[in-house]
């Protein structure tokens, strides 16, 4: 039996190739700002955005040649931190079809994988829906 989608203030839908622009940063910053202000937020990752929460990303990004001694958190770490900081108001979902199509099967704890037909339930459960990326 399918689990009910929790009611949230905002659904951020992250679609397409997330690294072709500042899409991911915009999504994460928007989610964090909303959560800090007391809103409840769910993110639906579709397409290559399903790769953002893979366990294989590790805790940090590869080293930056311009700042060799500085470590930067991976997207998986950033999402994991949001989920840990706001356990009752932050939700991250990955599209099962898109993830399996791209080999993205092992997500960090807290990421829920949903079949694509459940997306309508997520839209219905949100007060506001914001699409980021391409459809």
Image (cartoon, rainbow, N blue to C red):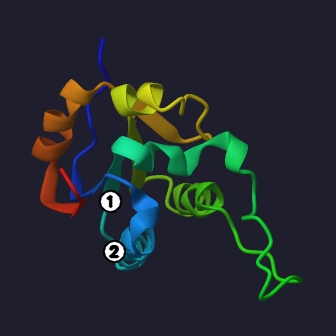
Q: Name the residue that disc number 2 marks.
A: 34
Label 2 crowding class (10 Å Cα cut-off): few <14, some 14-19, many 20+? some
Which residue occupies 13% across, 36% down?
A: 120
> Which residue extends farthest bottom?
66
**Residue furthest out toward the right:** 69
Q: Residue at x 61, y 54 (%)?
A: 76
The CA span between labels 2 and 1 is 7 Å
Which labelled disc corresponds to residue 58?
A: none
Closer to us: 105 or 114: 105
Residue of label 1: 41
Determine whether, in the image, residue 98 is placed left or right of residue 124. Answer: right
Q: Secondary structure at mark 1?
A: strand
Tell me which corner region of the image, top left, top right, bottom left or bottom right, holds residue 66: bottom right
Q: Position of residue 91 (x, y in %)?
A: 41, 49
Q: Earlier in the sequence, mark 2 or mark 1?
A: 2
Query: Which residue is located at x 66 percent, y 62 percent?
Result: 74
Report x, y in % for residue 118.
Answer: 22, 29
Tag count in the figure? 2
User: Vertically, is 115 above or below 132?
Assistant: above
- What element does badge 2 sit on? helix
Q: Residues within 10 Å of mark 1 (few under 14, many from 20)?
A: many
Location of residue 2 in the rendering, given as x and y in whole percent from the top left corner: 29, 18
Contact between labelled residues 1 and 2, with CB atoms less than 8 Å apart: yes
- Above or below: residue 122 compared with residue 4: below
Nearer to the camera, 94 or 64: 64
Residue 108 vs residue 64, the one in the foreground: 64
Placement of the N terminus among the 4 image quadrants: top left
């Amino acid at each position: 039996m399918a689990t009910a989608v929790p009611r949230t203030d905002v659904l951020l839908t992250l679609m397409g190739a997330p690294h072709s622009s500042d899409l991911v940063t915009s999504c994460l910053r928007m989610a964090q700002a909303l959560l800090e202000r007391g809103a409840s937020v769910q993110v639906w990752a579709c397409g290559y955005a399903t790769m953002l929460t893979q366990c294989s990303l590790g805790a940090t990004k590869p080293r930056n040649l311009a700042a060799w001694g500085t470590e930067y958190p991976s997207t998986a770490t950033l999402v994991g931190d949001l989920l840990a900081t706001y356990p009752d108001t932050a939700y991250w979902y990955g599209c099962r079809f898109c993830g399996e199509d791209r080999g993205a099967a092992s997500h960090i704890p807290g990421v829920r994988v949903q079949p694509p037909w459940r997306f309508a339930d997520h839209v219905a459960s949100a007060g506001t829906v914001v699409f980021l990326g391409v459809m």
